[in-house]
Amino acid sequence: MLCLLVFLHCQSKEQPKSYSDATLLHHQQKEVVAFVYHRFGDDKYPSTNISLDLFEKHLAYLKSHDFKVMTFGEAYAYLNDPEIPYTKKAACITIDDGYKSFVSNGLPLLQKYGFKASIFINSESVGGGTYMDWQELKQIHEQGIEIGNHSHSHAYFLNTPSAQRIDFFKQDVQKCQEEINQHLGFYPDVFVYPYGEFDLEMKKAVAEMGFKAAAAQNSGIMHQCDNFAMPRYPMAGPYTKMDGFIEKANMKALRVKCDNSPSFVLQGANPPTISIAVDSCGADLSRISCFTDGACDIKVEGNKISMIAKKKLDKRRTLYTLTAPAKKGNAWYWYSHLWIRPEIPE
């Protein structure tokens, strides 16, 4: 019952009393593992590419292990609507930027396995260089691929001075909305932050602009609570190996209390300390581990966890990651927090 009460604390809207405890408990258990891809079978760009052989192996694994594969919008609905039945294994395939290699190489494999996906486009790039054009985007949308907003310019918005940042961000995102509506006939309701970078004001703006959910690029498992910073596992370059994919596909969410997750933008002390409280009843916090670029220290007091790197963060983006085994069985739990230092060039 403790886990059920925690779930009710996480919800922004009170659940109708007609739902049974069993229904709510199943709903609380819902999780979706999300993967983000960019290019498919394009060896010219190895850091954002996945080979077709490995991509097909990813899909084959999901198929043979009975994962229900959803679009990002469907994953949002599944996680937030108790009336959508619980499924033990759920995955979401997302593709950022809208490169042509998706049409020629990625889409045929998705269709072979009968899977859906979501693609997030930056409208300024549509039709240029290695990017899909509007006709190709129209065709894939008609074939069941969800299309979302990835901003117009795909800018490093955190590089803009804070006084001008939010206006620039909102205008740029709205420009993408208008371009998609003009060419495809609809306004997307899902969003992805370019480079996974945002501050709290930008996240608030995405909600106010009418989007129902947004994805970041910190790794982890999608679950209830924060619909505007959904985590995804990167699948490009060295991260595409099959053993790593299988490990992540079977990971569970180390759930941070909804009102407890700090901002992504590093302000103040460096290295920063992350202090969180977790709701994951099944995780063995006595065996929790921390990972970052280098060594880290971790302190656990009940369900409260603090973590700090042993050296200053010297990159633009640095992940703090926590993992813990299950109290029973072979499952593992995962949480990561992205620290961003906007003053450091990419």
Image (tube, rainbow, N blue to C red):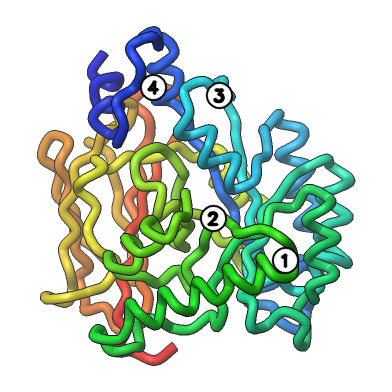
Q: Which mark is residue 190?
A: 2
Check disc 3 and report the residue beneath it.
84
Q: Quadrant of the C terminus?
A: bottom left
Tell me the residue at 30%/19% (across/down). Answer: 4
Q: Residues within 10 Å of mark 1 (few under 14, many from 20)?
A: many
Separation of residues labelled 4 and 2 (CA atoms)? 36 Å
173 to the left or right of 111: left
Residue 253 is drawn in which quadrant?
top left
Q: Residues within 10 Å of mark 4 (few under 14, many from 20)?
A: few
Q: Residues within 10 Å of mark 3 (few under 14, many from 20)?
A: few
Residue 102 is drawn in which quadrant?
bottom right
Q: Amino acid at mark 3?
A: Ile
Separation of residues labelled 3 and 4 (CA atoms)? 28 Å
Task: Kindly tell me whether residue 330 is visible in this rendering.
Answer: no
Q: Quadrant of the N terminus?
A: top left
Residue 156, x across and y down, in percent: 44, 83
Q: Earlier in the sequence, mark 2 or mark 3?
A: 3
Check disc 1 and report the residue beneath it.
50
State yes or no: discs 3 and 1 in contact (Cβ < 8 Å): no
Separation of residues labelled 3 and 1 (CA atoms)? 32 Å
Q: Amino acid at mark 4?
A: Lys
SS label for mark 3: loop
Q: Which mark is residue 328?
A: 4
Separation of residues labelled 1 and 4 (CA atoms)? 35 Å
* Camera-side mark, 4 or 2: 2
140 to the left or right of 125: right
* Camera-side mark, 3 or 4: 3
Q: Amino acid at mark 1?
A: Ile
Q: Residues within 10 Å of mark 2 (few under 14, many from 20)?
A: many
For residue 263, above or below residue 335 = below
Residue 264, x across and y down, in percent: 29, 66
Q: Earlier in the sequence, mark 4 or mark 2?
A: 2
